[in-house]
Every structure is written in C-alpha cells, then in structure tokens.
Amino acid sequence: MAVLDTDLDHIFPSSVLPPFWAKLVVGLVAIVCFARSYDGDFVFDDSEAIVNNKDLQAETPLGDLWHHDFWGSRLSSNTSHKSYRPLTVLTFRINYYLSGGFHPVGFHVVNILLHGGISVLMVDVFSVLFGGLQYTSKGRRLHLAPRASLLAALLFAVHPVHTECVAGVVGRADLLCALFFLLSFLGYCKAFRESNKEGTYSSTFWVLLSIFLGAVAMLCKEQGITVLGLNAVFDILVIGKFNVLEIVQKVLHKDKSLESLSMLRNGGLLFRMTLLTSGGAGMLYVRWRIMGTGPPAFTEVDNPASFADSMLVRAINYNYYYSLNAWLLLCPWWLCFDWSMGCIPLIKSVSDWRVIALAALWFCLIGLICQALCSEDGHKRRILTLGLGFLVIPFLPASNLFFRVGFVVAERVLYLPSVGYCVLLTFGFGALSKHTKKKKLIAAVVLGILLINMLRCVVRSGQWRSEEQLFRSALSVCPLNAKVHYNIGKNLADKGNQTAAIRYYREAVRLNPKYVHAMNNLGNILKERNELQEAEELLSLAVRIQPDFAAAWMNLGIVQNSLKRFEAAEQSYRMAIKHRRKYPDCYYNLGRLYADLNRHVDALNAWRNATVLKPEHSLAWNNMIILLDNTGNLAQAEAVGREALELIPNDHSLMFSLANVLGKSQKYKESEALFLKAIKANPNAASYHGNLAVLYHRWGHLDLAKKHYEISLQLDPTASGTKENYGLLRRKLELMQKKDV
C-alpha cells in the first residue's frame, strides 16, 4: 500500500472504499455541486458561440465546421478569433438538433454530466499519480492508493473555479478537452506493463492511441495538445526514473558511470519520445495550415500587460497574473466572469506592494520543483513531479510565453491545472497527517474545505443562471472593470430600462475612455431618446479611436441622417461598408437615406444589395415594394413582392405590402387572400384591417368593407385615413338605402 494512502487512513477508513462506490460518490457530488445551473439561460459568451452561431443550424453544411472558428467565422478571415474547436461546435449542433432549437436546458445538462464523468475518471487518474504503475505477474496494478485518489477526486469535483466551465455552456470546450486529455494520459499509462521491472515493455498501439486522443482533445480546445508534453514528462521522470539529484552528483564527481545511464540507452523511451514529438509537430503544422493567416489580433483592453513597452513590466505583470491564478485555486471565493479592462491594474514599478505575491509564488514553486527533482524519496518525487506537471503544462498556452492571449485571468483555463493543485493539496494533507498527532483536526479541516467548496459551487452556479445575476456578482469583485458595467448596461437596455443602462454605460466609458463599444451602445440609446447631439459626439469619438469600427460608422450615419446632415450621413454609411463589405443593415439604412433624398434608383440598388447579402432582410424587401408602389411601378413592385415571399413565405408585413400592390392592380381575389393571411398572422394590426376594408370598398363588397373598417378603428381609433374612408362608406350605404326606399 502507498505510504501517502496509509497517512490518510484516519480520513477514509479502508472499509468504505470499494472502487465502484468511491466513483459513484465522486460523480454524484460533482453533479450536485453544479445541478443548480441546469435550467439557466444562455449567458455571456453563449450568445455569440451558440445563439448567433449559424454552424449549429441544419442549413450550414457539416463540412463548414472544419473551416470556421469557435464563433462561426471563417478561419481565413482577419477578424477571426482563430479558436479552432470543431468537435465542441459539433456537440453544440447535436444539442441543438436534439433539443429542437435553442433550449438551454439540454446544453446545461450535458455540461453537468460531462463534469460528473470527468470527476469519476479522475479517481483512476489520481490512482496512477499516487500509486504508480507497478504490476503483478498477472498484469494487475499494485498500490491503487484508494484513499488519496478519492480525496483528490472529491477536491477536484467540488472546486468552485470550475463553475465557469460547467455552468457556462461555452465551457464545454474545456470539459471535452479535459475528458480526452485524461483519456490520452491513461492511454499512455496503458503502454506500460511489467513482469519483472517497471517500464520494460511498451505498446506502440497505446502510444499512438494516446497521440490520437491528444489530437481529439486539441480539436475540442487548443490546450489539449499539452497532454503530449505531460506524457513525455511522465515517461522520463516517472517511468524512466530519471533522478536529477543523482545526475548532478555524478557530474560534480565526474563519475564515469554517467556515460552508461540506462535512460540514455533505453531504445523504447527514445522511440516513444520520437512518436510524441512527431505527433505534436504534425498537430501544430496542421493547426497552422488550417488557421490560414497569422495569430488573432487582440486589443490592449483584452490583455494590457502584453502591450507594455518595457519587457520588465510585461514579465512582472505576467508573473502577477500567475500568482492570481494560483490564488484562485487556493481560495476560489472571489470569482468573476471577466478580469479584463482595469479589473487588475498594471504593476508599473517593483515598488508596487503586489510584487510580494509573485515572490511568494516563485518561492513556493522553486521549493516544490527542488523537492520534485532532487528528493531521495522516489514516491515523493513522483507525486510532486506529476502534480507540478498537471499544474503547469496545461496552463502554458494561457501563460503569454509563446503568444499573446486575449484575456488577463480566465477561470476556465484552470480546469485542467486544478488537477495538479488537487494532487499537491492531497499530498500536503498526507504529510501533515504523518507529522502531527491531531489527526482528527486535519480530518475536520478536509471535511470543512469540501463542504465550503460545495456551498460555494451551489451559490456560484446560481449566479451563472442569468446574465443579470452573473454581471452584478462581478461588481463586488471587479468594480473597476469597465466591461462589467458595460454588460450590466447592455442587459438593462435589452430589458427596456434605458435610464439605468445609460448610467452603467457612462461609468464604463469613465473607467475606460477608449471603450468604443460602450460609446456605440450609449450613442444608440441617446439616438432613440432623440438626444442627437450627444449621440453624434460619442459615435464620432468612437470612430476616431477605432477607425474600422463599422457598426459605429453606421450608427453615426443614422444620427446624422436624423439631423438632416445628409452628405455626412452618406459618407459615414460608405465608411461602414468600406470596413465591413458584407453589411446588409448598412445598405438598408443607406437606401433609406437615398429615399429621403428622392434618389429612388440609388435607394433601390442599396436595398437590393441588402437582400443579396441577407435574403431574409424583410425591411429591405418591404421598402423596395413600397417605393415601387408609390412611384407607380406596380408590375415591378409585384415581381419584387413575389420574390420576397418565396424567400420569406411567413412574413406578414410582406404579405400586406404585396396585397396592397395587387389591390391597386385590380387583382382583388389574390389581394384578399394575402390580406387575410397577413391578418391571421397578426390579427391586431389596425392597418391590415383598414387596407383590406379599402380593397373591399373598391371591389364593391361594402358589408365586408364596413366590418373591417370598424375592426380597424377599434384597434386604432386615431387613424384619420380610416375614419375618412369609413365615413365615405357610411354615406354611400345611406344613399343606397334611400335609393332602395
């Protein structure tokens, strides 16, 4: 039995540790922790990655998933995020198909079950990490370390830092990546069997399968490739029993036996390293080819430290970020959906007191590394090495060491590194138990940590159920984060509370005077409230700060159009289209400008461009029909109306517009059918009943005309045109009655 497992006997007696029940308990605890999020909404990044992602819908060919990024944009586009996770998107698509649409319950349930399954799998992973890979002659593994593996798996299952991955649907990328990452690691462990000595036999099949599973993990999220590095460290330091202390001593004493190190002459190890290196290089090459252009372009607000001019400032802040990630693992109480935009001010001098945090981090890391590489206790060396390996290696892609990342701190990237944290914490509890007589106190501390973390998971899962709760929960953690205020403002604006939204948008702009998205949204609200001068100032500032901000250019054009500054509005629309060539809404607004200026041909061309780019653009189709109708081009208006209804057959506004045209063309029967169909779809539209009444009036069906005039006036008593027509009809009916008499 492993030494560490014996030290933990007071916490988990052997009588309650059958493997099946241990896994069942871990799985149930993991599910209970996050079950509260099962009926939550789509929140934060879920909107872009799921709700607005056309790759989830059946109309998009499955093959497109392999050419698009996580958000549905083409990877070759300069605006692409370059996050290539086609297998994760495929699971979203399956969810969408099985749910019959964007119903979040199914998406959340899958995430919760995935975390439960991964937590169960962690029992086997921790069993390898704590117990090693020693086998009997019959192939059964010795030293399963049931107590240590159960404790570590429970610590993993209830860690609150996992909430973002589990309760946020986009966190599925991290969950799937972790699942295949762990399967790859366990597959690599299967490559080793022993009959006389550990590691004397390896199976190429299992190594290749491990590489394949690593590739699958990478197709779920990019950090999956790091499992190959972890497998290499595991092979060299654990299976190969590479002892750094022994090597250093031999070098210092010029020991000739150094030349005959068994590891250097181990053909199996060299072969496995060659396979891992080749597999990793192949994955990176394919990933680079698929990515097309260079790395994604992030802005200073996403990751301010990476834009610092001084290399020293960058290094200090990167290390401070590492210490914050370590603190989130140690004390996951202050959690936030976003840590950018002023949430963590830059350290610009070594005199800043926060450098103490990074000094403490490296003091602990260096101590652990020395123990992991130089300890004479092989058991201790293995556990610390693998604990540090799981802690550090999966975190490397988020470290800014190899490329700039688009965040400061992200709780989701700690899902896999938390495995290493749980190993080290469990080892620490074992060491404490070994060197103290107050074993009941340690058991109480362990139980307390598990219960407190479970409670924190339940509370945090509740905060992720809606955007309002999620965004407001961040105010106490990151009150200086402009994005937090922006998201609260956006949420309030979506609910129609413009006054409160303005207050939060203004605070976001105050905290970050270059926050162009907050300026754009604030400008839009002010435009709707007819506060046009301030709206124009804000939008003009936004496009000066970010000249390629197409949406701000379009909104500026709308404001300038409202201010009757038509030339400036046209120029703003043109700038928007210059920076976003496929911009149907901008073409639509440009068409409205031309219509106001009586440039009918230009208006029709602009609206036609809008419908070419977005065939379901109902407003553009409608405006074309109405303009052609008003200018007497009834045949052309009819043709456009029929074309529009073929593309959008259930749009009642198009039915209404085409019915008006057909009525003027004296195609009364067909016009009547369209009016009735439009009224069935939208029975409370007064204009629909009023225009149908006009049709009946012309057609001579006066009773039906009277009926629909009255319905229209009931719905809208202020409609002057309908009142006038109804009056004419009543006088006509009165004259007819007198004539009959």
Image: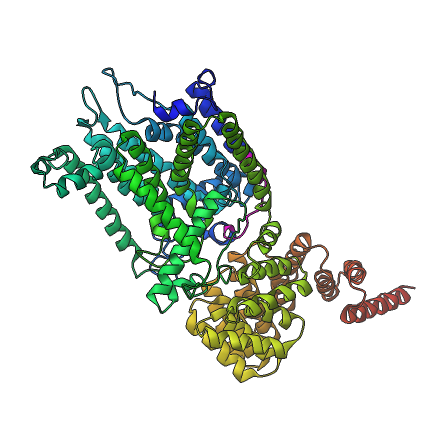
The residue depicted at 47 percent of the width and 22 percent of the height is: 10
Quarter of the image where one finds residue 265? top left
Q: Is residue 508 visible?
A: yes
The image shows a total of numbered marks equal to 0
| Part of the protein shown in magenta | 33-46
Left or right: residue 218 versus residue 256 is right
Residue 671 horizontal/vertical position (percent) = 64, 60
Foreground pick, 520 / 137:
137
The residue depicted at 38 percent of the width and 60 percent of the height is: 316
Residue 311 horizontal/vertical position (percent) = 33, 65
Residue 139 horizontal/vertical position (percent) = 25, 18
Foreground pick, 261 / 332:
261
Left or right: residue 36 versus residue 98 is right
| Residue at the limit of the structure toward the right, as seen here | 741
Q: Is residue 495 above or below residue 253?
A: below
Q: Is residue 591 visible?
A: no
The colour scheme of the drawn protein is rainbow
Quarter of the image where one finds residue 274? top left
Q: Is residue 5 above or below residue 325?
A: above
Give yes or no for residue 116 being in the magenta stretch. no
Residue 476 horizontal/vertical position (percent) = 60, 54
The residue depicted at 52 percent of the width and 35 percent of the height is: 449
Foreground pick, 504 / 640:
504
Position of the N terminus, as image quadrant, is top left
Q: Is residue 537 above or below residue 691?
A: below
Give yes or no for residue 34 being in the magenta stretch. yes
Position of the C terminus, as image quadrant, is bottom right
